[in-house]
Amino acid sequence: MLQQYTKEFKYNIRLATPVILGMLGHTVVQLVDNIMVGQLGTAELAAVSLGNSFMFVAMSLGIGFSTAITPLVAEADGENNFDAGKSAFKHGLFLCSVLGVLLFLTVFIAKPLMYAMDQPPEVVDLAMPYLNLVAISLVPLIVFQAFKQFSDGLSLTRYPMYATIAANVVNIVLNYIFIFGKFGMPALGVVGAAIGTLASRVIMVGYLWFVLSRHYKAKDYVLHIKLFSLSKKMLKKLLSLGFPSALQMFFEVAIFTSAIWLSGILGKNPQAANQIALNLSSMTFMVAMGFSVVAMIRVGNQKGLKRFIELRRIALSIFLISTILAVVFALLFVLFHEALPKLYLDYDNELEAVDNFQVASIAAKLLLISAVFQISDTLQVVALGALRGMQDVKIPTVITFIAYWCIGFPISYYLSMHTAYASSGIWIGLLAGLTASGLMLFVRFHYLSKKLTIES
């Protein structure tokens, strides 16, 4: 009985690994920024956290919208329908390009909100120039996502990984040069980190297009694109899938962003500690996201082939392997909850000694809570991937809103602002929201997949 699921593990892992590494690339950009900027002081680390909180919200909308491309391309690939696949990619690329520009302009206009958010003044002053450059990087990032989701839909999951590895090398080198002022360049601090991020994201797009344009399976899709020859029907289909998918990711990312803002109200040290715990949790979440993409691809393929019993079996095998890995990560967080935060702080800096100790202590407590929600976070994101593969997006959008904003956020706000739990209270709310989302989305998948197998 169990073997019918475990026999899929090898292929699922092989397909997921490049996706995970590619997604980790996005997180590693931020990890490198955090570790390097953290050497400058806790105020600088908090500034990067505050600036990125605006970026997370915008990125969630762009990345969430782009996921509409994958199931359509995967379904067309399963049907061996080139025209449908190219149409989905072309229209998706057009919409992502427009969305990238709109998101950049929105973040740029919204910057003054930082002054009205009751954040530490020294943190806001440092975050403003950082956000100027990082906001521009939204345009190449969302365009990259269109190419990435298309590539994933064709099961060519390695190439986005290669692009993000190249981008990370550029980011590390430029961070070193511009943050600390090496090779005759000025020491720009947090602005230097923004320069590295912008350059790395431009390189990601160019590299991925170049690789795909030389691949026998992808080149006819990415060459000779008539970007402004558009079909209202396909635009409408992508919008009907992409808009709810964007909202799903927005609702989740926004509650984590609210955690950054609530932490800022508590002070710069709680905000820096939140950033450390959030960055580490994001690393493990990328593994779950990788399996979510695999669920979207493989469920989309089986939907195209109308093999609904296989669709359910394959999806359940992905739930199983991703949950096993989530348990492993939970144990690692418990075992190393005190050691991991110290990677981000300069303990040789005597002037920052008291602040560093407080940041590390708070972050260690948050990692224990994060350990608990590893499983529910994995369950909800893999369920979303499977449901997107089935092109079921409207009900999951309602579920995510209820879970995060009717359950999770009120608990975070009350416990952090009105009890002694403080930072821990914020993350208890995150735990509640993720658990509610995971359970409801899995029930939704179980109901729909069972219904399809009965009807077939």
Image (tube, rainbow, N blue to C red):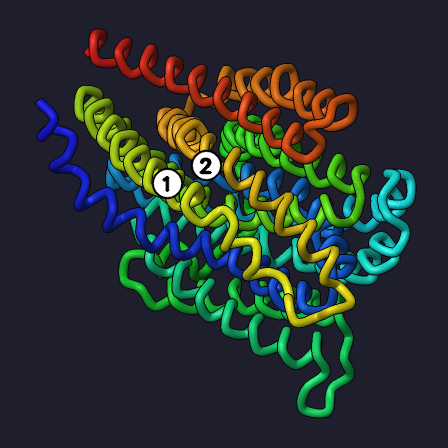
Q: Which residue matches tag 1? A: 331
Q: Position of residue 162 (x, y in %)?
A: 39, 65
Q: Position of residue 358 (x, y in %)?
A: 69, 50
Q: What residue type is disc 1 on?
A: Leu
Q: Secondary structure at mark 2?
A: helix
In the displayed structure, 363 sits above or below 180; it is above
Q: Residues within 10 Å of mark 1 (few under 14, many from 20)?
A: some
Is tag 1's residue or tag 2's residue first in the polypeptide sequence? 1
Q: CA distance from mark 1 to mark 2?
A: 7 Å
Q: What residue type is disc 2 on?
A: Ala
Which disc number belongs to residue 371?
2
Identify the residue shown where x is 86% and y is 48%.
120
Q: Nearer the viewer, residue 278 or 25?
A: 278
Give the quadrant of the N terminus.
top left
Q: Is residue 370 left or right of residue 289?
A: right
Identify the residue shown where x is 53% and y is 37%.
231
Q: Quadrant of residue 45?
A: bottom right
- Labels 1 and 2 touching (C-beta < 8 A): yes
